[in-house]
Amino acid sequence: MKDKKIKNVFKEGAISSEFIGESIAKHQTKTSIGAHNIFLGQVRADEIDGKTVSAIEYTAYEDMANEKFHEIREATFEKFNLTCMHIYHSLGKVKAGEICLFVFVSSPRRKEVFKALEYVVEEIKAKAPVFGKEIFEDETHQWKVNS
Amino acid sequence: MQLNIKYFGLIAELTSCGEEQLEFQGTKIEEVLEKLFEKYPDLKTKDFQVAQNREIVSNDSKITGGDIALLPPFSGG
């Protein structure tokens, strides 16, 4: 199910488990699907120099990021036999333990979704201009760098 | 030519603004950067990529006008 329209991937704040659950439920009518695979990125309470991360505040070059997400979607549909794919990324503050990235791929067959999901997530990490500010409990911060 | 310069993440923190207009006479990205380094000397010590009209470009790319963005290392997900 390819579509050419550029979608807005961003959601304000954390991605709720209700939203994720509803997304799964919506696919019950798509009965050609035999396998879903889901990646959930969760904010980690990293300890850095004795201080603990309490939240990450995300900002993005939204126009460019949405174009990049679109290109990643197109490339993923080219490479893998997928029925559908959904990507959501948080903007603003997401507390430790909450979900900031939700990637959902579906296919008739399981092998495709295992490979496709890893590809999509790695591409997002490398190509989407999204920036995370790690906020500590004492309100100081540092800028996150993806490893 | 009038350029619209956008800053993100730690770069926006350094420039204290997210976006500004720059009157520019020149042809290449590196010339824009030189001008920005004059205004914000600390920029030189930072790691960033440049996007022109939402595509990553190199320092010797030609200016085509529009939006120039300074992007620090990505940290989405």
Image (tube, helix red, strand yellow):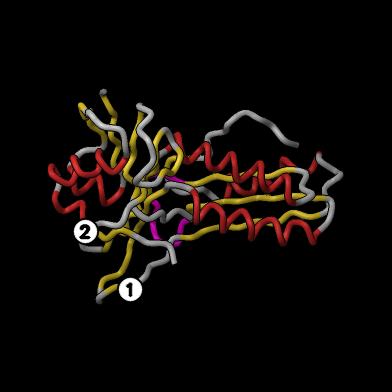
Q: Is residue A92 magenta?
A: yes
- Judging depth in this view, the residue of A106 and B68 nearest the camera is B68
Q: Residue B4, percent across and down?
A: 29, 29
Check disc 1 and report the residue beneath it.
A47
Lateral position of residue B39 relative to residue A15, left or right: left
Q: Is residue A61 magenta?
A: no
Q: Residues within 10 Å of mark 1 (few under 14, many from 20)?
A: few
- Most extreme residue toward the right, as rendered? A32
Q: Which residue lies at the image location 50% right of the left edge and 56% below the top edge? A: A125
The three-letter code of the residue at mark 1 reads Glu
Lateral position of residue A26 relative to residue A11, left or right: right
For residue A137, above or below residue A86: below
Extent of the magenta region: A90-98
Q: Residues within 10 Å of mark 2 (few under 14, many from 20)?
A: few
Residue A87: quadrant of the picture: top right
Magenta span main SS: strand
Check disc 2 and report the residue beneath it.
B45
The three-letter code of the residue at mark 2 reads Thr
For residue B27, above or below residue A105: above
Q: Residue B63, percent across and down?
A: 35, 33
SS state under label 2: helix
